[in-house]
Image: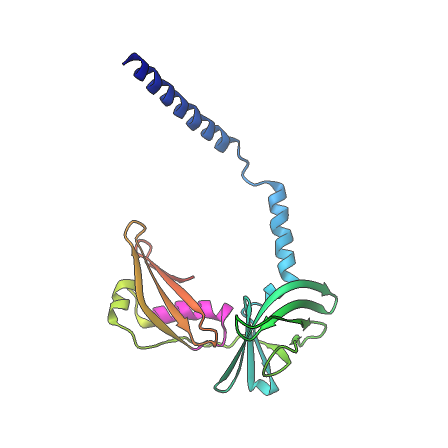
């Protein structure tokens, strides 16, 4: 019995020491390492000289009859009812006074053998353009202002509105705000019919698919505490 008590006392003592050391580590942690701040600033500058700064932007060619948008890893081109998708992977990037040259590998489907190519973003004039031989509908597009498109919802159960405590306009506004920065040519969204309820976190999450040619998935989250509806 004494041996068991001794072992228990040692275990409790060890836990106290671990807890104490954890508190000490937290107390000694600086609010922000200066080096970390410099790394963030460098990362932001690198993004400005990268194709990442053009993700979600709107482009057009041939008087606006052809449109294009750049997403992360995919280029979506449209002409009327025709849509072409080109998948890309960045190999390297080089910025200069005139713009950015992006070495990429491209495929038309995820199973295709990748082809080498270059995306050239020319920012030397007021009219920014992008050129790539891998584009399907036009090899060159001009940067446009993002269209002020409103996302419309496909037919869905009224149960969705009840669970999100939101009407269709509120849901559309949340989706439109998200799409304007990532998929500017999307015009409608289809609900996937599933809802995830986090009882502990008091949140409701569901998904929509945009008609942007790449079937981009957007998650909506409703916070039951703050009553905030946001797209992720």
Tell me what residue is drawn at x 54 percent, y 39 percent: 31
User: Where is the C terminus found, in terms of image quarters?
Assistant: bottom left
Q: Quadrant of the N terminus?
A: top left
Rendering coords of residue 8 (x, y %): 33, 20
Where does the magenta region start and end?
Answer: 169-187
Q: Is residue 196 left or right of residue 109?
A: left
Which residue sits at x=48%, y=71%? 180
Q: Position of residue 76 (x, y in %)?
A: 53, 76
Q: Is residue 50 visible?
A: no
| In magenta stretch: residue 172 | yes
Identified at 68% across, 75% down, the residue is 126
Colouring chosen for the image of the structure: rainbow
Front residue of 123 and 67 = 67
Which quadrant of the figure has residue 121?
Answer: bottom right
| Count of numbered labels shown in the rendering | 0
Specify the principal SS of the magenta part.
helix
The answer to whether 67 is drawn above or below residue 36 in the figure is below
The x and y percentages for residue 192 are: 34, 69
173 within the magenta span: yes
Quick one: which residue is furthest to the right in this view?
A: 97
Observer-nearest residue: 138 or 7? 7
Q: Is residue 45 visible?
A: yes
Which residue is located at x 58 percent, y 73 percent?
A: 107
């Amino acid at each position: 019995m004494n041996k068991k008590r001794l072992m228990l006392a040692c275990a409790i003592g060890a836990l106290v020491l671990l807890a104490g050391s954890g508190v000490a580590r937290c107390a000694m942690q600086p609010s922000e390492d200066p080096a970390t701040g410099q790394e963030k600033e460098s990362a932001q500058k690198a993004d400005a000289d990268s194709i990442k700064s053009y993700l979600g932007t709107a482009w057009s060619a041939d008087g606006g009859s052809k449109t294009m948008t750049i997403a992360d890893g995919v280029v979506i081109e449209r002409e009327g009812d025709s849509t072409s998708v080109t998948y890309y992977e960045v190999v390297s990037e080089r910025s200069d006074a005139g713009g950015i040259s992006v070495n990429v590998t491209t495929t038309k489907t995820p199973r295709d053998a990748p082809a080498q190519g270059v995306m050239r973003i020319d920012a030397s004039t007021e009219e920014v353009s992008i050129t790539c031989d891998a584009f399907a509908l036009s090899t060159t597009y001009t940067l446009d202002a993002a269209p002020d498109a409103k996302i419309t919802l496909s037919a869905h159960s009224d149960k969705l509105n009840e669970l999100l405590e939101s009407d269709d306009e509120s849901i559309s506004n949340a989706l439109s705000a998200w799409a304007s920065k990532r998929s500017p040519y999307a015009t409608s969204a289809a609900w996937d019919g599933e809802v995830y309820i986090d009882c502990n976190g008091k949140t409701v999450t569901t998904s929509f698919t945009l008609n942007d040619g790449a079937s981009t998935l957007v998650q909506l989250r409703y916070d039951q505490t703050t009553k905030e509806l946001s797209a992720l």
